[in-house]
Image (cartoon, coloured by chain):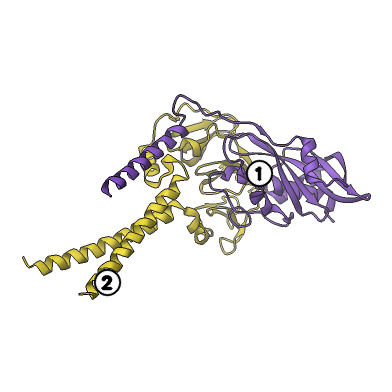
Amino acid sequence: MNKTIWKKAHNLLGLASALFLVMLLVTGLMLNHPGWMRKQDAQKFEIVALDPAHPQKIFAAGRDALYVSENSGKDWQEVEMLYPPSETADIRFDPRDPSRIWLLERWGKLMVSEDGGKVWDLKTIPFDPQSKGVELRMISLGAPGRVAIVTSHGWIRSEDNGKSWDESQLRLDRPSLNRLVLSIHNGYFFGSRFVWLYDFSAVALLVLVISGFVLWQAGRSAG
Amino acid sequence: MGIRVRHLFLVFCALALSVRAARIGGCGEKQPEFIEQVFLTEEAAVKAVFSENEKVVKRTRAFTQEQKKRIESRLGWTVAESSVAVFEGYRDSQTSGWAVIAEEIGKFKPMTFMVKVSNKGKVERVEMMVYREPVGAEVRRKRFWGQFKGKSAQDRLRINRDILNITGATMSVQAMTAGVRKALVILEELYTRK
């Protein structure tokens, strides 16, 4: 086969790989630092809950706050909360008393309001989701006082509105392979400071790609 | 050159693994669940936030039902306390400011700190008194609490918008921010509300 064709294919594939690598590096850096993207995502709603008692009223959770609309979503107001929720996983209205609203953070707190979302309070969860690597996913409300929280490692149940919890269905000792792989991939496995080392390596690779491209161009123009 | 790069890579791997081992309590050493660090006693905190020429009087102020309702409504949060101990500062018999001891849960345990507010209702100082978590004590540094200086009860104090977060100490940042906001609203309701 013609040597020139191989060389052209090699150059083309090299360039495509370099662009692919740049894309991976940039997106990897951004994924490791979600705060960089947070500004533009701040107003995006991740969870929406329609108030069953007030047809016009809607609650919606953004990344770092809870919002309420009294006119079917035309206007939104941030709900004043001493601990605004971040990364909300679920919002539930008590089917028997819709003025009681439950809110669950993906990696943190369980909150409840008894007055339709004006004043909130914390409910204690028997473990720290973040340090245990347990993702909180969903709230389920049953008979009066019965609450369950579905997590990535099983579920917990309360018979007294979240004062005490039955953890028999929770498997905290079961390691999450997905989380382990993810934490090795992003550097958090070794500690939060190692993420910056990963970033440094990513930037170094980026410089290698760019300098390689520049050298290749210089070589071409030199003949 | 190849050997050097290989050595560097091995050193990096060894370092990363040893850091990881230390974090999960390698060598049989178990990390304590919490460490209580007392930075200031109540008396020392009062001395730190008030100047020498201010006379300080400690007074317990109980909330009326109406005040409590208003505080809860403004904070959007339940207030468990029915009263608060306020350190009132006087200079030449004029009120110069107030300070309260705030206690908020960080990750597992409460942190105790003093918030000093001027007679104009603006934060002047925040002093950590007792910290009870193994991580996150960075919030006691002036570089962090300095962000609260000049803030009043009218400021929402939203993390990542009004107050910069500290990576790895989010819970402590949330707790201190909540404590300062609560102190500002309570002091305004008790003293400066017209």
Residue positioned most to the top = B28
Residue positioned most to the right = B93
Instruction: Give the answer, above or below, for where B65 lies relative to A217.
Output: above
Q: Tell me the subunit letter for badge 2.
A: A
Which residue is painted at 94% across and 49% down in the image? B93
- For badge 2, the amino acid type reads Ala
User: Which residue is at the front of the view, A119 or B13?
Assistant: B13
Residue A168 percent location from the top left of the image = 47, 26
Residue A67 percent location from the top left of the image = 59, 55
User: Which residue is at the front of the view, B77 or A206?
Assistant: A206
Q: Residues within 10 Å of mark 1 (few under 14, many from 20)?
A: many
Q: Is residue A115 visible?
A: no
Q: Secondary structure at mark 1?
A: helix
Q: Tell me the subunit letter for badge 1.
A: B
Q: How many marks?
A: 2
- Give the color of chain B as drawn: purple
User: Which residue is at the front of the view, B135 or A88?
Assistant: B135
State the quadrant of the C terminus of chain B: bottom right
Q: Secondary structure at mark 2?
A: helix
Q: Give the chain letter for yellow.
A: A
Residue B40 percent location from the top left of the image = 73, 36
Establish whether labels 1 and 2 are both on one chain. no
According to the picture, the residue beneath numbered tag 2 turns out to be A218
Mark 1–mark 2 Cα distance, whole angstroms, equals 54 Å
According to the picture, the residue beneath numbered tag 1 turns out to be B140
Q: Are marks 1 and 2 in contact (CB under 8 Å)?
A: no
Q: Residues within 10 Å of mark 2 (few under 14, many from 20)?
A: few
Q: Is residue A161 visible?
A: yes
Displayed quadrant of residue B156: bottom right
For this view, does A126 lie left or right of residue B124? left
- For badge 1, the amino acid type reads Arg
Frontmost of labels 1 and 2 is 2
